[in-house]
Amino acid sequence: MIRASLKGRYDNDVTGAVGTVTVDGGDVLLKASITDAFFVNGPSLNGLTLSFEKPASFIIDYNFPKKDVRFQFMNTVRVMERPLNLTYTHWKGENRTALDGTLVIDSANKFSANYGFDSGNCKLKYSYTHDGLTTVEPSYDIGKNAWDFAVSRRVYENDVVRASYQSSSKVLGVEWTRTSSLNGSFKVSAAVNLAEESKIPTLSAESTLDFDLWTPTHLGSHAL
């Protein structure tokens, strides 16, 4: 099966689009992603990324503009009978390495951590979901000695409203997301820097459309 995704984004300063074509090869996926930079001055390798992925196992992609390879490996281990999801990511060109871990206590409680080997910084986050509708996510950045906070609420079956505050940058954000299995997703967000005198909000809108380009059909014989 060949599946395509088209994402468009608009905000105060930048307008752009990203298109992704995925070829399902069974256990692995082949992906090609392009941005609008791919078409500037004619088709080029600018804005092109190729990926080779085995879901929940590994991802290898090559970013042509940056000439950088990213390796990502995922695994799950058991800690006190609870799953610990680990993700190891290395950017070869930028020589950066990060390790992410999420410990799932139960369906409502999760602890996660991100550690950057190059910077030595660590970020911690706790996520609590109440009645499957409201999620509270406090996080702490050890390097910046700063707390961030986010809370989201599922309003309808496909609508989620989320508010967040970053204490280090003093940015307050609000976003609304609608997801549909037929029409893709749509997100509207606004952010304001409380440290600025003007406090003019930054507005953005993002729309994603998913569709099948080709689906193989299997012909079978029917007994009469």
Image (cartoon, rainbow, N blue to C red):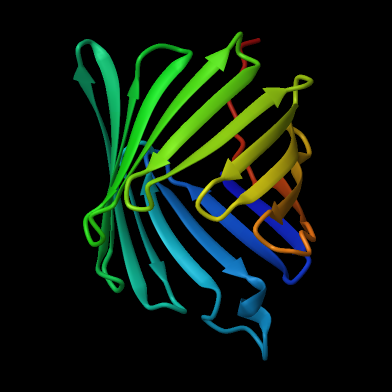
The residue depicted at 74 percent of the width and 71 percent of the height is 13
Quarter of the image where one finds residue 79: top left
Q: Is residue 30 left or right of residue 172?
A: left
Name the residue nearer the viewer: 146 or 128: 146
Q: How many marks?
A: 0
The residue depicted at 48 percent of the width and 13 percent of the height is 108
Q: Is residue 5 left or right of residue 197?
A: left
Residue situated furthest bottom in the rendering: 41
* Quadrant location of the N terminus in the rendered image: top right
The residue depicted at 78 percent of the width and 57 percent of the height is 201
Quarter of the image where one finds residue 93: bottom left
Name the residue nearer the viewer: 88 or 60: 88
Q: Is residue 198 left or right of residue 62?
A: right
Q: Position of residue 27 (x, y in %)?
A: 37, 39
Q: Position of residue 95 (x, y in %)?
A: 25, 69
Q: Is residue 186 above or below residue 111?
A: below
Q: Is residue 198 above or below residue 216?
A: below
Q: Position of residue 188 (x, y in %)?
A: 78, 47
The residue depicted at 78 percent of the width and 39 percent of the height is 183
* Quadrant location of the C terminus in the rendered image: top right
Q: Position of residue 113 (x, y in %)?
A: 32, 37
Name the residue nearer the viewer: 67 or 20: 67
Q: Is residue 187 left or right of residue 33?
A: right
Quarter of the image where one finds residue 55: top left
- Is residue 212 among what the camera can see? no
Q: Is residue 67 above or below residue 219?
A: below
- Is residue 64 among what the camera can see? yes
